[in-house]
Image: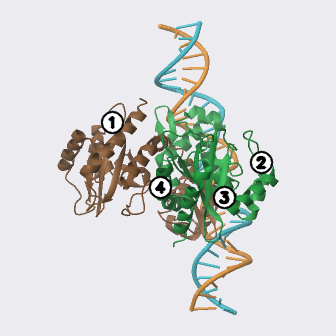
Chain colours: A brown, B green, C cyan, D orange
Amino acid sequence: MPNSVLGRAMTLLTAFRTGEAELSLAELSRRTGIPKPTAHRLLTELARWDVVERTPGGVRLGMGLFELGQLAPRQRGLREAATPFLADLFEATHETVHLAVPDRVDVVYVQKLAGRLGPRVPSRVGGRMPAYCTGVGKALLAFAPPERLAEVVAAGLVRRTPRTQVAPGLLEQELARVRARGVAEEHEESTVGIACVAAPVLAADGYAVAAISITGWAHRLDTARLAPAVRTAALGLSRVLRGS
Amino acid sequence: MPNSVLGRAMTLLTAFRTGEAELSLAELSRRTGIPKPTAHRLLTELARWDVVERTPGGVRLGMGLFELGQLAPRQRGLREAATPFLADLFEATHETVHLAVPDRVDVVYVQKLAGRLGPRVPSRVGGRMPAYCTGVGKALLAFAPPERLAEVVAAGLVRRTPRTQVAPGLLEQELARVRARGVAEEHEESTVGIACVAAPVLAADGYAVAAISITGWAHRLDTARLAPAVRTAALGLSRVLRGS
DNA sequence: CCTGGCGTTTCGATGAGCGGAACGTTCGGG
DNA sequence: CCCGAACGTTCCGCTCATCGAAACGCCAGG
C-alpha cells in the first residue's frame, strides 16, 4: 500500500475492473488494503472533482475522468482523424473495425466500430493487448524502431492459445513479411476463434503511429479479400496525418 | 490554489485545454499558481501512473488516463451498445452522428461519427454543451425528471447565438412538443450554421439516459426527412438497453 | 433481539508534503 | 562572446495535511 496521497488515490481508481459498475467502500478497502476512513476521505474529495461518483451501492468512476481521458493527446487527434476512415471501412465490410496505438510492448485500442452480428471480440476501447500476438500489434511492430521488438522479446512471448507464436525468430521473420506486404494477419493467436487483418498508419518518418484492423470469425474472415481495404484505409489516414 | 494534494493534482490535470498537446512545467505553474517544485513533484508521481507522460517540451495527459476514463460506467456500456446503431445511422445518412448523455445541466458527448465532408461541428467526445440549446440536450430534458428543467432554468439560459431560446416558458413549450413528437431539433441555437435533429434513448422508467442525433449544415439538413431515422436508431438502442 | 457489516465521524499524532533557495543548462539578444 | 532570463531539478528544515483506531448509528439477516 503506498504512503503517498496520489499513490493511494490511484490505487483506489485502478481497483475498478472492466465491467464493474460500482464498488462499495468496504470492497475498495478490502481490495486495496487502504483503511476505510482513509478511502472514504479520498473518495469524497475525488467525488468533488467528478473523478468518482457516489451511487446507492458505493462509488463508480465518474464522467469527469472520462472527460479528462478524452483530452489525452496521443489518442485524441488520431481518433478524430481516423473515425471517417474507420466508418468507411465498417460500411464497406460490416466487420468489426479497430484503431490501436502502441504503448510500450502493448497496443491500446482507441476506437472500435462493431455491428451486432460479428463475434464478441474481447478488445475494448481503452483496453490493452500484447503486440506480439495481435494483428494490430504486429503491424505496429513491423514498422517500429528496432529496439521495440527487442523490448517485446525481453518482456516474454507467452502462449495464449494453441496458435500463439512464441519463437522470437519466427516472429521476426513474420514481421519482415509484414513490412514487405504492408499488412499483418492474426489467426487465433490471441483469441481462439478470432482472426484479424491489420495495416499500419505511418508517420512521415516511416514509423507506425497506429494500426487499423478488421476483425471477425476465424472460420469466415477472408483476410486476402479484406487486406486491400484495410491497407487503403490505413494509407488514407497516413496521408491525412502527414497533412497532404 | 487548493491546499490538498488531490486538489493540486486535479488542478494541474484540468489546466490542459482542448487541443493542447503538451504543457511545460513553467506554464503549468503559471496557470495554476502551484509553485514549480511542487508541480514538478506531483507530475513526477503522476507520470509513474501514466496519468501524465513526459515529453521533450514538458508533459502531456497520458494514456493511463484515457484507459481509466474508458472504464467510467456511465458512458461505457452505453457507447458499446450504441455504436452499431450510430454506425448504421452514419451509413444511412453520411451526416455527423452523436451520442450524448446528461450530466446535471449539460450534455456530455460520448461518441461521434463524422465523415470528411460535413461541417466542422464543435462538439467532441468527452466535451460538454448546455442542454437547453442543443438538440440532444432538449431531447434529454423533455424526458428528464421535472426538477432537471428547474435546475437548467435556475442555472440560467444564456444567449449563445442570435437564435438561442432564452425564455423559460418557450423552452418548456418546446419540450412539451418534443415529448409529443419524440424528436427534438436545433436550428443554430448553440452554434451558428449548425442544425441537428435528436431523439431520446429511454430507459424502462420512461426517462432518457442518452440521446442520439444527426448534425449538419443548417442550410442543408433536412430534419423532417432525418427525424424518423434518428428516432428509429434511438428506439432500437432503447430496446437493447432494456434487454428485450 | 443480537450480531456482523456497512458508511461516517472524530481528533491527537506524525511524517508526507511543502516551496524558497540554490544550482546547472539553454537560449536569445546586445 | 557575454549576460540575463528562463527553464527544469534538487535540497532540506519546517509544518500542517493526512492518517486511522475507535466510536457511532443504521441496516439486514439469523
Q: Residues within 10 Å of mark 1 (few under 14, many from 20)?
A: some
Q: Secondary structure at mark 2?
A: loop
Q: Amino acid at mark 3?
A: Leu
Question: Which residue is disc 1 drawn over?
Answer: A207
Which amino acid type corresponds to the residue marked 4 in the rendered image? Asp
SS class, disc 1: loop
Label 2 chain ID: B
On the image, numbered disc 2 is attached to which residue?
B157
> For the residues tagged 1 and 2, is the chain the same?
no
Question: Is residue A83 at all visible to an observer of this figure?
Answer: yes
Q: Which corner quadrant holds the N terminus of chain B?
A: top right
Give the residue type that dot 1 points to.
Answer: Tyr
Which residue is more in the foreground, B107 or A152? B107
Q: Chain of mark 3?
A: B
Cα separation, mark 1 vs mark 2, equals 49 Å
| Chain to which the residue tagged by mark 1 belongs | A
The answer as to whether the residues below labels 2 and 4 share one chain is: yes
Tag 4 residue: B88
**Image spot of residue A59 (x, y percent):** 60, 64
Mark 4 burial class by Cα count in 10 Å: few <14, some 14-19, many 20+: many
The answer to which of marks 4 and 3 sits earlier in the sequence is 4
Up-down relation of residue A54 to residue A88 (above or below): below
